Amino acid sequence: MYGRGHQTVSFGPPVTPNVIKQLLIANLAVFVAQAVVPVLWQLGSVTPYLFWRQGYLWQPFTYMWLHAGLMHIAFNMLALWMFGSPLALLWGEKKFLRFYLLCGIGAGLIIVTWPAIPVLFEMGVPDTYLLPTLGASGAVFGVLLGYSLTWPDRTIMLLFPPIPIKAIYFIPVIFFLSLLGPQNVSHVGHLGGVLVGWILLRRMGTTGGLTFKSLQYRWRRYKMRRNLRAVRMDELRSRRRSDDDHRTFH
């Protein structure tokens, strides 16, 4: 995956801020620690039942430092490095760290709250109420949103599949691809990170002017461009048929 802005093409950011390095080191250190001390999985992962019934109130914070395997932590840390570094350089390290942590914690609170709603209203106990969730994806999705809204017109090349897309469409595409992936992915956590990130960005005034009306405008502009391309294709086919008829006539 690489980012492209204007005429610049590169794999990853040219500079890695200290806050990104520290987050990477912290996540890797906890990953090693959880392999040595397996009880960290149960204590640190966020489980709605343990949060509401057993008083494990720290879990919406600790879950974001744990990961389920090498691929899990590799993809999260790659995204944090690639898209978090430009934001940290733009915002400053303290502001970025606060944003990252709040997105992760906010996503954790949503993870424990959403499955508890049917339990509260005695509608049954969903599986997710008893299942643990771990990983920095909620915080990372908040970072991805921040990047997408800060530089919406930058082009990003996906790894799987290897196609270029505009940054503004990155979140929907990644979320759609995650739906096609393993069933144990926490989509609530991903959307929770996006939701909290959106709220924080609105308060910061850095949403790039992206509102419901602007989304409607983008959609109308897309349809106009699509219709224009269709008209041009029809004109081109009509011109080709005319040329063929002319050559056949002579």
Image (cartoon, rainbow, N blue to C red):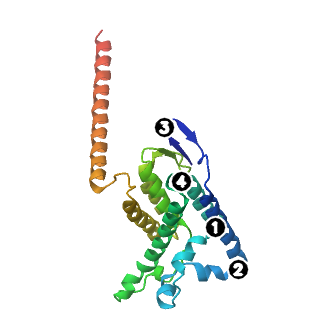
- Report x, y in % for residue 216: 27, 51
Q: CA distance from mark 3 to mark 4?
A: 17 Å
- In the rendered structure, are the residues bearing label 1 and label 3 in contact, judged by CB atoms less than 8 Å apart? no
Q: Amino acid at mark 1?
A: Asn
- The numbered dot on residue 27 is 1
Residue 132: name its quadrant. bottom right
Going from N to C along the chain, the mark reached first, 3 or 4, is 3
- The numbered dot on residue 83 is 4
Question: Residue at the location (33% across, 87% down)?
Answer: 121
Q: CA distance from mark 4 to mark 2?
A: 31 Å
Left or right: 106 as drawn, with respect to 232: right
Disc 4: CA contacts within 10 A as few (<14), some (14-19) or many (>=20): many
Question: Residue at the location (50% across, 61% down)?
Answer: 95
- Report x, y in % for residue 29: 69, 69
Going from N to C along the chain, the mark reached first, 4 or 1, is 1
Q: CA distance from mark 4 to mark 1?
A: 17 Å
